[in-house]
Image: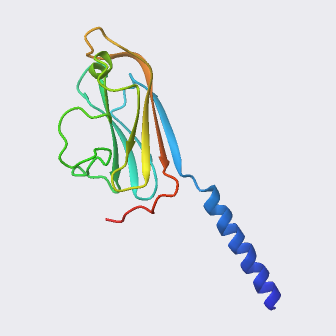
């Protein structure tokens, strides 16, 4: 009986290690810069939500996107954890706007830390083309990749 219990325990223990090794610690999202949706969301983990929101919901042509990572559950007062500070004002690399591209305000590939969590987010603009005045996107894609940093502490609980 003891051998059978030990064997069952060993199998459960090994399966637990295997499950942890195969757990997903990242993901990606790619969409057209002219996508008509106002909001695109993806779950990062049980604590965090990726939100990509059109910056100009009333404009006829998409001119920008605001990439956010927020704590679950989201509400209107949720903070964007991609901002390095709670007191941030002005353009930020998590914002993807046509005028930023026209003026080369930010690089086409940018990595941002998720404040308070062991994740990083990479935003990649793929072949972005904007209207001459930078008011809207003509073509291109946005790829967002999130991943857990290796050897990082577990997420903070708030």
- Asked which quadrant contains residue 61, the reply is top left
Question: Residue drawn 37% across and 63% down?
Answer: 156
Question: Residue drawn 52% across and 47% down?
Answer: 26
- Residue farthest along the front direction in this orientation: 151
- Asked which quadrant contains residue 39, the reply is top left
Q: Could you tell whether 59 is left or right of 38 in the image?
A: left
Q: Residue 128: x, y in percent?
A: 41, 18
Position of 140 relative to 2 (above/below) = above
Q: Residue 142: x, y in percent?
A: 43, 28
Quarter in which the C terminus is drawn? bottom left
Question: Residue drawn 19% across and 42% down?
Answer: 88
Question: Residue drawn 30% across and 15% down?
Answer: 102
Q: Residue 125: x, y in percent?
A: 43, 25
Q: Residue 116: x, y in percent?
A: 34, 56
Q: Could you tell whether 44 is left or right of 1 in the image?
A: left
Position of 33 relative to 1 (above/below) = above
Position of 124 relative to 89 (above/below) = above
- Closest to the observer, 23 or 147: 147
- Asked which quadrant contains residue 58, the reply is top left
Q: Could you tell whether 27 is left or right of 74 in the image?
A: right
Colour convention: rainbow
Quarter in which the N terminus is drawn? bottom right
Position of 32 relative to 148 (above/below) = above
- Residue farthest along the top direction in this orientation: 132
- Total number of numbered labels? 0
């Amino acid at each position: 009986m003891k051998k059978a219990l030990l064997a069952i325990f060993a199998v459960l223990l090994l399966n637990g290690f295997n499950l942890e090794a195969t757990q997903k610690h990242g993901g990606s999202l790619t969409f057209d810069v002219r996508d008509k949706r106002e909001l695109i969301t993806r779950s990062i983990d049980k604590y965090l939500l990726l939100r990509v929101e059109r910056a100009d919901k009333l404009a006829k042509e998409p001119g920008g996107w605001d990439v956010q990572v927020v704590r679950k559950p989201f509400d209107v007062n949720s903070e964007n954890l991609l901002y390095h500070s709670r007191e941030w004002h002005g353009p930020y690399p998590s914002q993807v706007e046509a005028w930023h591209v026209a003026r080369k305000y930010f690089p086409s590939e940018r990595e941002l830390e998720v404040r308070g969590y062991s994740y990083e987010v990479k935003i990649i603009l793929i072949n972005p083309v904007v209207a001459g005045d930078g008011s809207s996107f003509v073509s291109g894609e946005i790829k967002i990749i999130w991943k857990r940093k290796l050897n990082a502490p577990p997420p903070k609980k708030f």
